[in-house]
Amino acid sequence: MSVRNIFLLFILFIGIYCNAAEKRYDVKSPNGKIQLSISKANSGDMTYQLSVDGKKVIAPSRLGFETDGGETLPSKGWKIKDITRDKVNSIWKPIWGKRSTVPEKYNELTLTFANKNKPAGNLEIIARAYNDGIAFRYVLPQSDETVSEITTFNFADDYTAWYYNEERHNIGPELLTETDGERMPVMTIKADEDIYLAVHEACLEAGEPLKLKSEKGDRTFSVASSTPHIWNDGYRSAWRVIFCGNKPGDLIDSHLLELLNPGPAEGYDFSWVKPGIALWDWRIDGAQWGDFKYTMSYPSWIKMVDFAAEQGFPYLVLDANWYGPEFKQESDPVNGDKANDVKKLIQYGKQKGVGIWLYLNDVGGSHYPLEETLKQYGEWEAAGVKYGFMTGSPEEKNIKTRHITETCAKHKLLVDFHDNPVHPYGQMRTFPNAITREYCKAQLDGHEIFYPKTFVTSVFVNMIAGPLDMNNGMFDLRKGKTTRVDNNQEVPSTVVSEAARTLITFSGATVIPDIPEYYRKYPALLRFLSAQKMPWAESKTLDGKIGEYIVMMRQAESGEYLIGAATNEEERTLQVPLHFLGDGTYKAEIVEDGDNAHYLTNRETLKVSEKTVTRNDTLNVRLAPGGGACIRIF
C-alpha cells in the first residue's frame, strides 16, 4: 500500500473516531452570519462554541450543572431523547421602547435529555440564534438535589473588555487575561475591529443575578454563584446571552433581552404606561432664582408642575423625605409629614396633565405593609414609584424587585429602582411599567468618578442591559459651589453635552434635575428637551467608540428627528450622515459648544445655527472637550 493511501486511511480513521467521540448540533442566525455549535462528547460532557462571520470568538465552553455529589448534568448517564428545531419570524410592537416595531426573528434548537435512573423528568438545553446574538437556557427536571451552574465563556483570544462596576467608573479597557476575580455584567468585548460582543442574561425568573469570574492569565469566564440551590420545581434558568455586532452601537440598538422575556403579563392592562421626561425635586432643593428659593415643598412643586405642563413634560418626581426622614422606621409612607400636600399636588398635576411620582425607601417598604402602601398610592392616582436603597442578598433583591414591579402594575404605577438595583434583564417586555433603573452612577452623585469618559463608556456597557436613570440634564454649570442642598459641587460637563446626554441615555423616564429658569435660559436646548416625545418611533446609534464618543439618533413620536452627540475629555469634530431621513427637505436646528467651551472651565457657552437638509447631506459638528452637540430636524 502506498504512503498516500496509508495517509488517506489515517485521515478517514481520525474522522470516524472524532465523529464517534463527539456529536455536534448547530444553530445559525437567520442571516447565516452567527453560528452556535453544541457538542456532546463521548464522556457525556456538553460544550458550545460560537462563530461570527466565520471567525471563532468563543472556543469550546462548558454547559450544564454540577450536583453536590459531583455529578454533571447532563453527563454520561444522560442520553439525547429528542432534537427539535423551530423558526420564528414575527414582529413585536412594544408599548414603549427604542422603536415602535421590532423584528422577532430567530432559529431555535432544543436538545432534550433523559436518564433512566432519574425518571422524574427530562433535562433540556434550549438555544436560539438571532441576527444580533445568541442565547441558551436550561430546563432542569424536578429534583431535590443541590446544583451549581458550570457554564463558562472560553474566549478564543485575549480580547479587550469593559464591565459594569456598580456606582463607580466602569472597569476597562482590560485584556481578558488581566482579569482576576469577579466581574459584573454587562461585559462588553471588542473581539476584532468589526466584531463586538456583550455577555449578559435575560428573563431571570429565580435565583441570583449573574456574575462572572476569571483568574489572571486565563481567557475563560465562569458563572460565579455564591450559593448552590435546590431546584425542586422544574427550574428554568435565565437565558445566557451573547450579543454580536459589527460596531459597538449594534449592541446598544439590540432588543435581545426583551425578546427573550415573555410578552405582557396576563390579566394586566398596560395601555396607561407612558414614557417621557420627568422633572425632579431633589436637585432643585436650595436653588435660588431672584427672590425665590426652591425647596422640596408644595410651593416649589407647583412651580415645577406648571413648567412641566408648559413644556409638555409628563412627570414630576418627588424624592426622599416627603413622608419623613427616609431611613427612620417611624416615617409612615402613607400618613407621614407632607402626605396631605402630596395628595393635593397629585390632583393639581392631574388638572395640568402632569403625573406625580412618589419616592419610597426600603425602610418604609419593609416596616409598613408594602402592598397596602402601593395600593394607596394607586388610589391617590400617583404616576409611579421610585424605590430606593433595597436591602437583602442579590437573590432576595431579585424576588422583591419582581414582587414590587408586579404590585405596581396591579395599581397602575410606573416603577424606577435606585441605589444598586438588580440589573435589568429585559423585564420591560413582560411588565412595561418597569420603566427605568439606576444601573449606573447617577452623574450628579459621582463627581469623584463621573467624568466625560464615564458617560461614553457606560452607554456602551450598562445601557446594553436596559433603560437607565442617570439624571443627566443639569444646566446650572457655573464655576464654584452652588446653593443646592445635596451635593453642591460643580458638574464636569458642558450645557450642550448635558442636553445631548438626555437623549442618548435610553430610559422610559428621563429624569432631569434642574429648575425651570435654567432651562429657559437656553431656548434652543429647551426646544431639544421638549421635542423628546416618547415612545420613540425609531432609534439608531449612528457612530461611536467605547470610552471616546457616541452619536445617537431617536425619532420622536411626533415625527421629529433628534440627534445627540457626546465626547470624552477630547475635543473632536464628527461627521453625521442624515441617510435615515425620508425624502424631501427638512430644517435642522444645530446646537454646538461655543468656540472656547470646556467641561472644566467654560461650560455654558454655545452657538446655534439652522440649515436646510436632505437625506443626502452630512453635518459636521464640533464637540468641545467633554462637550456635545444637539440637532433637531423637522
Image (cartoon, rainbow, N blue to C red):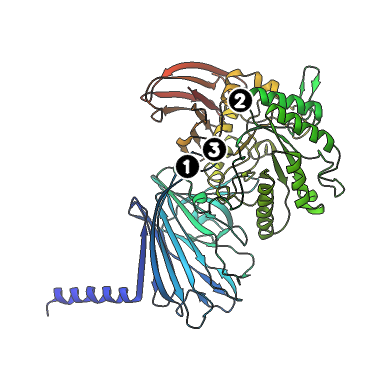
Nearer-the-camera pick, 28 or 627: 28
Element assignment for label 1? helix
Residue mark closest to the camera, 2 vs 1 = 1
| Residue 495 numbered tag | 2
Check residue 29 in the rendering and tell me which mark sits there, or answer none: none
Number of residues whose C-alpha sits closer than 10 Å to that of mark 2, classed few (under 14), some (14–19) or many (20 or more): many
Establish if 406 lies above or below 26. Answer: above
Label 2 and label 1: CA atoms lie apart by 26 Å
Q: Which residue is mark 1?
A: 253
The residue that label 3 is drawn on is 456
Q: SS at mark 3?
A: helix
State left or right for residue 275 relative to residue 336: left
Q: Earlier in the sequence, mark 2 or mark 3?
A: 3
Residue 313 visible in the displayed image: yes
* Between discs 1 and 3, the one toward the N terminus: 1
Q: Position of residue 581 (x, y in %)?
A: 41, 28
Q: CA distance from mark 2 to mark 3?
A: 16 Å
> From the viewer's perspective, is 348 left or right of 241?
right
> Residue 117: where, in percent of width, then height?
50, 83
Report the side of 481 relative to 48 (left or right).
right
